[in-house]
Amino acid sequence: MKIKTWPEVPFWDELVKKSPDSTFFHSRLWHEIVTQTYVDYSIATRGFEFSDGSRAIFPLIQTKAGGMLKGKGRLKSSVFGGYGGIIAERKLAEHEQQDIYAHLLSLKASISVDGNPFSHYSIPGTFTLKKDFTHVFTLNPTEEDLNKRLSRGAKSNLNQAHKKGVSIRTARSDQDVSAYFSIYQNTLKRWGKATLFTYPEELFQNIFRRGGDAAKLWLAEKDGSIIAGAIIFHWNRVVSYWHGASLKDYFACYPNNLLHMEIIKDALQKGYSYYDFGPSGGQQGVVRFKQSFGAEQFDFSSGHWKYRWKK
């Protein structure tokens, strides 16, 4: 097995576009956006080439000592709630997966891997494992099929959003992103001490400026004012909800319900297979909201391996 440190652009890009298991979080673009925003992050992705010429990658972000993720020599796959792990252009045998992980453990770094619910690869038992789940809406052939899966409450909320004049569009300017960031700051104040992690506006602007068709900010408006938004990633089969924020004063207008529904319809029209609502962080109210759309639970595991220095 040949190992490539920071695999060249064609190697990485071609592989993640070809693999049905990959999501936006496995892409070079996501890693470049993250490292452009955070100076204490660097790309540490490894590429692998097997004897038959087939290839695999393991996307990684490395954090520097004293950075946001404390500690020296820490590797993460992926970051900020994204999915990581092995991506390959063919199904890897068990021994090939073991060889990849053996290489990673030889790097003398603590490693965190956020599992991928769209992949059949598991994280080795040498890692401390944690079970998690996301909710996924499998995209059916017609909008009529989509509507049949909605709960009665979800249909009612969507009707209310339309009646109250909520409209949906995608961001068109840096000013739109700044307006969304203001809503996010308002949301953080509402969460108060429950907030564990915050993002700078620069990250949202970098996603908007560099994302192209792969990353879009969707906005809900009422009477010409932005009242809610969602950052959505598009990659291969999967459309992923990554981040959202809304103004409490407009909750009765149900902008989030309409946002998700319009994004789902757009994904269906463009031929995607799944709309991933994302993990719920143990919040049962969030789980019920996703279930009201007819989304199903997809289980996965994440893992952590702590490097212990030995003399």
Image (tube, rainbow, N blue to C red):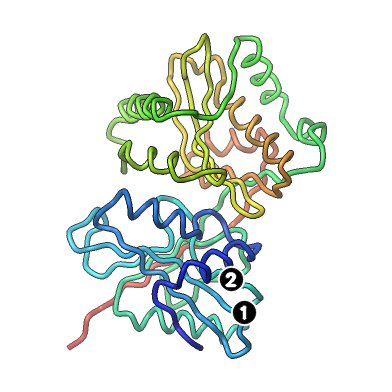
Q: Which mark is residue 115?
A: none
Secondary structure under tag 1 reads loop
Image spot of residue 253 (x, y percent): 55, 15
Cα distance between the residues tagged 2 and 1: 9 Å
Image spot of residue 57 (x, y percent): 50, 72
Mark 2 surroundings within 10 Å by alpha-carbon count, few (fewer than 14), some (14 through 19), many (20 or more): some
Which residue shows up at 32% across the image and 36% down it? 201
Which residue shows up at 58% across the image and 71% down it? 121
Q: Which mark is residue 92?
A: 1
- Which amino acid, by three-letter code, is at mark 2? Tyr
For residue 285, side relative to residue 103 (left or right): right
For the C terminus, give its image quadrant: bottom left
Secondary structure under tag 2 reads loop
Mark 1 surroundings within 10 Å by alpha-carbon count, few (fewer than 14), some (14 through 19), many (20 or more): some
Viewer-proximal residue, 202 or 25?
A: 202
To which residue does mark 2 refer?
Answer: 121
Looking at the image, is mark 2 or mark 1 nearer the viewer? Answer: 1
Image spot of residue 10 (x, y percent): 52, 68
Q: Is residue 273 above or below residue 131?
A: above
